[in-house]
Amino acid sequence: MVDKNSKSNVPIKLTVHWQFQALYIIGIVGSIYVTIISWLSSDGIALPLCFGIFGLTFFYVYLLSRSNIQVDEQSLVITSTHGIYKIDWHEIKIIETNNVAFAFLGEDKCLSMNLTMVGNRKQEFYEFLNKKIAEKNIQIKPLSSMKLFQKNTKIRGFGLRF
């Protein structure tokens, strides 16, 4: 029976903290500024190119920071720059974790996420996760670095193959 006053009726949405995103924007603007100044004040292209690459890196990291994790009663969904990944709770057999990074493992499936820079609602996520672990009898193991990838969970997006 679902309690109408329960917070778990509403999906939990985790995003990168706004302070990290602000730092990335400062990095983008600063890199553009230094690139222009170095372009105007030097004869070579190496220095402006170097700062331009820094700016592009900050821009890419900013795009990645716009990712979010949505958790509800049915599934876990990660929406990122390069795709949307999903695993249903009934598919999860094992969770590998170090309490910051998580790998949700099922039959030939893996969905991984890292909560290092997540803003608010992290505690609510941990409480919901503990409830699901008890409800679904999911096994917990220490995190293996080999499990920090997505496998057979992509809904759509382009492939980043390693």
Image (cartoon, helix red, strand yellow):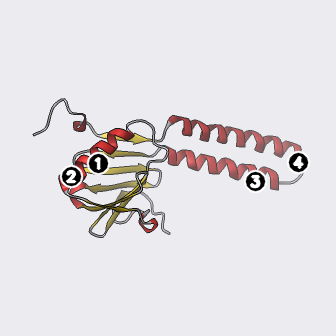
Q: Position of residue 110 (x, y in %)?
A: 35, 63
Task: Name the residue type under label 4.
Answer: Ser
> How dense is the environment of label 4, judged by Cα within 10 Å: few (below 14), some, or many (20 and up)?
few
Identify the residue under disc 1. 129
Above or below residue 86? Residue 151 is: below
Q: Nearer the viewer, residue 155 or 89?
A: 89
Instruction: Describe the element under mark 2 as helix, strand or loop.
Output: helix
Which residue is at 20% across, 57% downward? Answer: 137
Instruction: Describe the element under mark 4 as helix, strand or loop.
Output: loop
Lateral position of residue 24 relative to residue 93, left or right: right
Which residue is at 45% across, 42% downward? Answer: 118
Identify the residue under disc 4. 42
Identify the residue under disc 3. 50
Task: Choose mark 1 or mark 3, whichever is in front.
Answer: 1
Task: Name the residue type under label 3.
Answer: Cys
Who comes first in sequence, dot 3 or dot 2?
3
